[in-house]
């Protein structure tokens, strides 16, 4: 008889907690990241169209870049009010196992207008 060996692969997991990964100022340079690991190489992609899309920037999309290693870079949008953008990222390992996690980035807007005291 032949012995068959069954191997099991560990599914990927995010080491970055769900929720906020940072707050950036409107129009500022963005350099954030998320991390995921598995027992094989992991690629991180977006499942929503908020982080990397420019379809409705700055109202609903951010137009940032997402590298396969989880680096998020670019220039923050400039909404008229402080805005929190919610998006979902997917970690996929070499065995095509996936895990999704929802994150947010808040773009803050400073005070506008001016005042003068005499």
Image (cartoon, grey):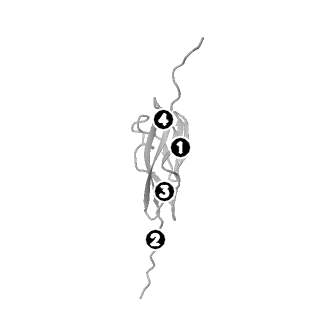
* Image quadrant in which the C terminus is located: top right
Q: Are marks 3 and 2 in contact (CB under 8 Å)?
A: no
**Residue bearing mark 1:** 73
- Calculate the distance from the C-alpha at mark 3 to the C-alpha at mark 2: 19 Å
**Residue bearing mark 2:** 8
- Calculate the distance from the C-alpha at mark 4 to the C-alpha at mark 2: 43 Å
Please tell me the numbered disc located at residue 77: 4
Q: Are marks 3 and 4 in contact (CB under 8 Å)?
A: no
Compare residues 89 and 84 and report the one nearer the observer.
84
Labels 4 and 2: the sequence-earlier one: 2
Labels 1 and 2: the sequence-earlier one: 2
Of circles 1 and 2, which is in front? 2
Q: Residues within 10 Å of mark 3 (few under 14, many from 20)?
A: some
What residue is at 55 percent from the left and 35 percent from the top?
28
Q: Position of residue 22 (x, y in %)?
A: 53, 42
Task: Provide the secondary structure element on which disc 3 rests.
Answer: strand
Determine the residue located farthest toward the right in the rendered image. Answer: 118
Labels 3 and 2: the sequence-earlier one: 2
**Residue bearing mark 3:** 43
What residue is at 40 percent from the left and 50 percent from the top?
47
């Amino acid at each position: 008889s032949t012995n068959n060996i069954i191997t099991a692969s560990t599914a990927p997991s995010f080491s970055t907690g769900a929720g906020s990964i940072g707050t950036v100022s409107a129009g500022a340079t963005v350099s954030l990241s998320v991390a995921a690991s598995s027992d094989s190489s992991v690629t991180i992609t977006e499942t929503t169209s908020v982080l990397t899309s420019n379809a409705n920037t700055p109202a609903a999309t951010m137009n940032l870049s997402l590298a396969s290693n989880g680096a998020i870079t670019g220039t923050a949008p400039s909404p008229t009010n402080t805005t929190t953008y919610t998006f979902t990222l997917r970690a996929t390992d070499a065995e095509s196992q996936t895990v999704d996690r929802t994150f947010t980035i808040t773009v803050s807007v400073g005070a506008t207008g001016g005042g003068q005291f005499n």
